[in-house]
Amino acid sequence: MKICFLGDASMNHVARWVNYFVDREHECLVISLEKGQSFKCAFNHVPMPALPRFIRYPLATFFISSLVRSFGPDLVNALFIPNYGLIAALMGTRPLAVTTMGSDVLVSPRRSPFHLWRTKYVLSKCDLVTSDAWMMTERIVSFGAGHEKVLTVPMGIDNSVFNMKDRTPPSLEEPVIASTRQLEPLYNVHQLVEAIPEILRAVPKAKFVIAGTGSEQEKLVEATRRNATSDAVSFAGWLRPTELAALLRRSSIFVSTSTSDSTSVSLLEAMACGAFPVVSHIPGNREWVENGVNGLLFRLGSASSLAQAVTSALSDKNLLASAVQKNSEIVQKKALWSDNMSVVESAFEVLKR
C-alpha cells in the first residue's frame, strides 16, 4: 500500500506512527512544513514563510497537493486535525484518514468559533478517523462524524522497552515519585511541585524525579527553590525510552497532573513498568484507572488532594502490590503498540479498497 503522511515531522508521535507502516513494508512518503525526525522512508520538507499559522498551513496546500499527486498514494493519512488535517481536507484527496491526538479534539475546538469550524470541516471530509480513547470518540461524534467512521484504538506502548523485566519492588521508606509529562501548561506539573512539601512532611525521605522539557521548566525549578524542596527534586530533562523505562521501574509512584488527555501513553508506560498511578481525575485517565483498585485519582487544582493520594498509596503495601499485577494484565490485553497498530493497518487496507 502507498501511504502519504501529512504531519508535523518534529513530533515523536508522528515518526513512531509512520515508521510502523514503513517497517510493515508499505511504501510511504512524509510531507511536512517542519524539519524531519528519524523517518525510515522518503521525507519532503516544504519550507514556508514565517506567516501566522492560520495562514501558513492553508497556503501550503497548493505545494503539498502537487507532491501528493506526484506520489500517487492509495491513502492519505493526516496527523492531526489542526493544520495537516485542514490541508488534507482542502486538497480533497480521497480516501483520507485523519489521526486525532487528544488536544486537537478536546482542547482546540474550544478556543474560538474558527477552531470549532475547522474541526467540524476536517471531520466532514475524511473517510476514517482514528481515536485513542472512547471519551474522545464521543467528542468526535458530537462534532458530526458518524460512529461508523471512527476507529477507537489506543496507540499503546512498546513492551520490549516498557516492561517489568529486572524490576525489584521499590523502597516505600525512600520512594521515588516520578512525573514524565512535558513541562507545558496543559500538563500542569506545578500542581505536583506545590504538593511536594506536604508529601515530604509525611514521607521525609521521598525523592521526586521530574522528566521532560518545556516552556515552564524555569518556573518549576524556581518554585522548588521557593518552597525549599529542591534537595528532594531532580529535573531529569528529556529521557530516551530505555532511560524512561528504567526510571519507571525504580519508581514507587507515577504522577500525571494533566488537565486534559485522551489515552496517555505516559500512563500506559508507567503501568507496564510497575509504577503505581496517581493521576488527575479526568475522563481519559478514568478509562484506565479505577480509583482505589489499580491507581488513585486526585482533584485538579488541589495540591492537598494530590499529596493525600500519594501518601495514602505509599502507606498501603497491599494496594501497591495488587495494582502492579492488575496493570500488567491491562496493558497486555489492551495497550500493546504492535497489536493495536495492526488494527489501524487493517482499517487502512479496507479503506484503500
Image (tube, grey):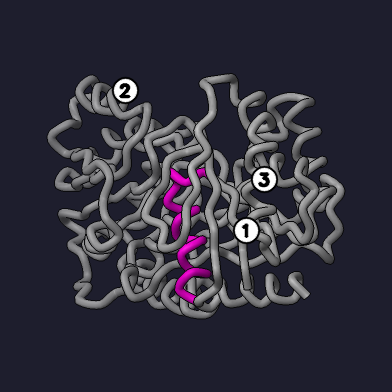
Q: Which element type, helix, strand or loop, lies under badge 2?
A: helix
**Amino acid bearing label 3:** Ser
On screen, residue 126 versus residue 191, left or right, reads right
Q: Nearer the viewer, residue 84 or 316?
A: 84
Gap in Å between the C-alphas at discs 1 and 2?
46 Å
Gap in Å between the C-alphas at discs 3 and 1?
9 Å
Residue 20 lies within the magenta run? yes
Residue that mark 3 sits on: 66
Q: Earlier in the sequence, mark 1 or mark 2?
A: 1
User: Residue at (61%, 58%) from the top-left corner?
Assistant: 4
**Amino acid bearing label 1:** Phe
**Amino acid bearing label 2:** Lys
Q: Which residues are magenta?
A: 8-24
In this rendering, which labeled residue sits more in front, label 1 or label 2? 1
103 w.r.t. 315: above or below? above
Residue that mark 2 sits on: 219
Placement of the N terminus among the 4 image quadrants:
bottom right
Label 3: how many Cα within 10 Å (few below 14, some 14–19, many 20+): few
290 w.r.t. 181: above or below? below
**Farthest front residue in view:** 70
Q: Position of residue 138 (x, y in %)?
A: 76, 54
Q: Which element type, helix, strand or loop, lies under badge 3?
A: helix
User: Residue at (70%, 73%) from the top-left corner?
Assistant: 347
Residue that mark 1 sits on: 71
Discs 3, 1 touching: Cβ within 8 Å: no
